[in-house]
Image (spheres, rainbow, N blue to C red):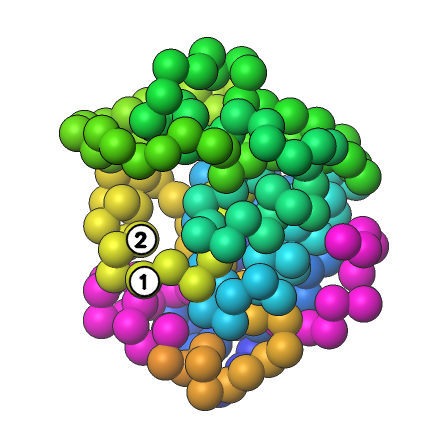
Amino acid sequence: MTKNAPHADDFDEATEERFVLSVNGVADFLSMRGAKPTIALLSPSGDDGSTASVMLARSMAELGRSIVLVDMTVSGCPTRLMSPEVGLPGVADLLFGETAFGETIHHDRLSNAHIVPQGTAQALHAVRIIERLTMVLSALADTYDTVLLEFGAADIEGVTRLLKYLDAEIVLSLPDADDALADHALAQLRALGYPAVMTMSEPLSGDRSAA
């Protein structure tokens, strides 16, 4: 069952229903007082969902929020859309290289949002990766109003293993309103202990900020 959920209380009370909001609606919801500073965005359909997540970052920036999007995708879609130039250091360089923290944060080319790109370092040493990543995300959460982690079409179970170490809201980014894909992803999340997940879904052309 689909239901609009403009209020946090509604979202908390009916965890078995699907809550679908537009990009602007999610931006408004996440900008509310008391919203968690870290948001994990899952895009089961791939780059179209990641594109909507970029639009979310830009929409929240238009609301006056300080926003950083961290590109955790395999495809690098957010990096291509937001980075002012190619080959910039990013999250991979923080986790596997020697790049300084400040050198991985860049301005979005079309808004006041910031981007931590996919990065260029090779994943050669994965020891203590979760510890390093949680330290990075904690530092970002202390600096920005909202940290958006875009995972793209990543394995949901793998993402939730990481989220055990983070206090994060989960948003499912499915701009084409694919009910079957949404139902499958939401069922997986419920089975993994995440019953209350918003779905961000609408045609990409209908929002404040075009990607």
Residue type at numbered disc 1: Ile
Q: How many marks?
A: 2
Q: Position of residue 28 (x, y in %)?
A: 68, 51
Tell me, yes or no, if residue 74 can be seen here: yes
Q: Does the magenta stretch include residue 81?
A: no
Specify whether 2 is left or right of 137.
Answer: right
Crowd tier of the residue under label 2, counting other residues whose Cα lies within 10 Å: few below 14, some 14–19, many 20 or above: some
Specify whether 94 is left or right of 61.
Answer: left
Q: Distance between the residues labelled 2 and 1?
A: 5 Å
Up-down: is 89 above or below 2? above
Nearest the eye: 173 or 71: 71
Identify the element where label 2 is drawn.
helix
Specify whether 154 is left or right of 78.
Answer: left
Q: Position of residue 18 (x, y in %)?
A: 47, 76
Asked if marks 2 and 1 touch (Cβ < 8 Å), the reply is yes
Up-down: is 183 above or below 100? below
Residue type at numbered disc 2: Val
Q: Name the residue under label 1.
A: 156
Q: Position of residue 136 (x, y in %)?
A: 39, 24
| Identity of the residue drawn at 46% across and 50% down | 73
Q: Position of residue 90 (x, y in %)?
A: 50, 29
Up-down: is 25 above or below 141? below
Range of magenta residues: 185-211
| Identity of the residue drawn at 70% across and 52% down | 55
Tell me, yes or no, if residue 147 can be seen here: no
Q: Which mark is residue 159?
A: 2
| Identity of the residue drawn at 39% across and 64% down | 196
Q: Does the magenta stretch include residue 195?
A: yes
Up-down: is 158 above or below 16? above
Q: Residue 61 carries which label?
A: none
| Identity of the residue drawn at 30% across and 46% down | 163
- The C terminus: image quadrant: bottom right
